[in-house]
């Protein structure tokens, strides 16, 4: 307000100085004109930098990308032909037509820029996303303009940037949004929500470095686009859908687990008839003599089912077939963890440089899956694997399921007693 008052005073002094000069009072007119310049200069020095610092330039200095469409290229070619004809012939009608065509291009650019102004974008995903499973994402586009609606908008992933130099090259993260989303109309001071069905094929971390909002309104000659800075990261967990290999191996794991857990209780629960799967040490000889048939004692189970998952990430080589087997092993380990989570077991997870102690599976299932989502193979021989397995399986009171890429002959015999080995090469 002070700046406006000062500029108003400077304008009044300048007009009054002009009146005095016309009436012949030159000296007074020069003094008032100089005072007017001084007041305007003070505003320029004091007020303008202060106002510039307070101005959020990002709201109006929006970086906009222009792109001619196929229709626009044809239209531009027609404009060039008419322009050449008008210059060669000097026909006024051709100049009028040319001016109308150029005005159409200008109007198309201005209206499309106006459609992109005042927009807010939000993109969200569920907390847990699994690879290969459809996931519902939510896209929200809001129009904050006070008077006008926004028409014919398209939201898509931004155009990939040029690759960085080799010394600065980082492993790119896959984009989340693959297909564009078309929104025909957003009223003023309102928003539009779109539910997107996304399927992210592989485990790992995905990143969305902003989204591109574009429009061809009104004539389709120009596509004007603006990239909204929007950082969205999501960790895609491995598949937990059982495969054929999982159904083939799971019965063997279950039988080994039951054999390991048999006889852990001490309190008598019941006496029943002998079955072929029972062990002879549980035969109750007194009840057998009395009933004249074999009877066995059943005990209560003192412990819940306790299972340890050990994942060996060491690979003998980095061939494509071996890496494909490694991905199958990661998915198999995730299926096992999910299976024991649904069974309500006590679970433990160990891999190279990472360990989760024995806990209820419901409490640690997602930390296990998150680790499996980011796990990477490491190259190492049989000696490194033996050291890793020796440390992982030492003094464990639970039944261990070990997934390893090493051959069968490299596993010491003493480690087979309380563990079940799943060899990656068999998956």
Image (tube, grey):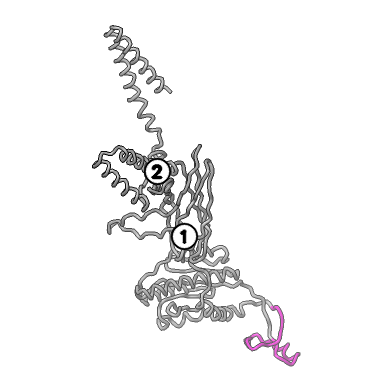
Q: Taking 258 as reference, is 140 above or below it?
A: above
Q: Residue furthest bottom?
A: 292
**Residue 199, image x and y in percent?**
49, 63
Asked if residue 287 is among those painted magenta in the image, a careful observer would answer yes
Nearer the observer, 148 or 48: 148
Q: Is residue 396 left or right of residue 88?
A: right
Who's the residue at 49% across and 66% down the image? 132
Q: Residue furthest left?
A: 88
Q: Which mark is residue 424?
A: none
Q: Secondary structure at mark 2?
A: helix
Can residue 133 be seen here? yes
**Residue 355, image x and y in percent?**
47, 66
Q: Taking 171 as reference, is 281 above or below it?
A: below
Q: Residues within 10 Å of mark 2 (few under 14, many from 20)?
A: many
Circles 1 and 2 in contact, beta carbons < 8 Å: no
Q: CA distance from mark 1 to mark 2?
A: 41 Å
**Residue 219, image x and y in percent?**
41, 47
**Residue 228, image x and y in percent?**
42, 48
Q: Quadrant of the N terminus?
A: top left
Q: Where, by quadrant of the figure, is residue 179 drawn? A: bottom left
Please name the residue that numbered disc 2 is placed on: 108
Tell me where the magenta segment starts and ends, as one range: 268-295
Q: Which mark is residue 235?
A: 1
Q: Secondary structure at mark 1?
A: strand
Who's the residue at 52% across and 41% down the image? 188
Who's the residue at 38% across and 33% down the image? 53
Asked if residue 258 is among those painted magenta in the image, a careful observer would answer no
């Amino acid at each position: 307000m002070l700046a406006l008052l000062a500029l108003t005073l400077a304008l009044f002094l300048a007009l009054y100085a002009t009146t005095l000069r016309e009436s012949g009072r030159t000296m007074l007119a020069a003094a008032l004109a100089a005072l007017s310049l001084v007041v305007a200069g003070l505003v320029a020095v004091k007020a303008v930098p202060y106002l510039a610092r307070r101005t959020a330039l990002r709201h109006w200095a929006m970086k906009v990308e222009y792109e001619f469409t196929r229709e626009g290229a044809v239209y531009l070619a027609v404009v060039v032909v008419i322009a050449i004809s008008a210059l060669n012939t000097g026909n006024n009608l051709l100049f009028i037509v040319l001016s109308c065509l150029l005005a159409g291009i200008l109007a198309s650019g201005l209206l499309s820029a106006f459609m992109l102004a005042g927009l807010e974008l939000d993109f969200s995903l569920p907390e847990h996303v699994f690879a290969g499973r459809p996931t519902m994402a939510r896209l929200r586009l809001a129009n904050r303009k006070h008077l006008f609606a926004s028409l014919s908008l398209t939201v898509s992933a931004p155009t990939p940037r040029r690759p960085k130099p080799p010394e600065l090259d980082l492993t790119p993260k896959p984009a989340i949004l693959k297909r564009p989303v078309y929104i025909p109309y957003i009223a003023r001071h309102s928003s539009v929500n779109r539910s997107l069905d996304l399927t992210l094929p592989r485990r790992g971390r995905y990143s969305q470095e902003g989204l591109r909002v574009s429009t061809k309104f009104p004539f389709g000659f120009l596509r004007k686009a603006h990239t909204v800075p929007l950082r969205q990261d999501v960790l895609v967990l491995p598949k937990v859908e059982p495969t054929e290999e999982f159904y083939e191996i799971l019965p063997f794991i279950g039988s080994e687990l039951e054999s390991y857990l048999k006889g852990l209780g001490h309190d008598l629960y019941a006496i029943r008839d002998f079955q072929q799967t029972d062990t002879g040490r549980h035969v109750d000889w007194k009840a057998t003599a009395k009933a004249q048939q074999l009877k066995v004692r059943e005990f209560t189970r003192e412990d819940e089912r306790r299972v340890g998952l050990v994942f060996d990430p060491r690979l003998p080589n980095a061939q494509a077939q071996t890496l494909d087997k490694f991905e199958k092993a990661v998915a198999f380990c995730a299926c096992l963890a999910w299976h024991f989570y649904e069974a309500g077991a006590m679970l433990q997870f160990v891999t190279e440089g990472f360990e989760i102690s024995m806990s209820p599976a419901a409490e640690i299932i997602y930390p296990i899956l998150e680790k499996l989502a980011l796990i990477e193979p490491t190259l190492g021989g049989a000696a490194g694997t033996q050291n890793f397995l020796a440390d992982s399986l030492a003094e464990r009171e639970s039944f261990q399921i070990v997934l390893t890429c090493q051959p069968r002959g490299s596993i010491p015999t003493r480690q087979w007693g309380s563990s079940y080995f799943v060899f990656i090469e068999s998956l």
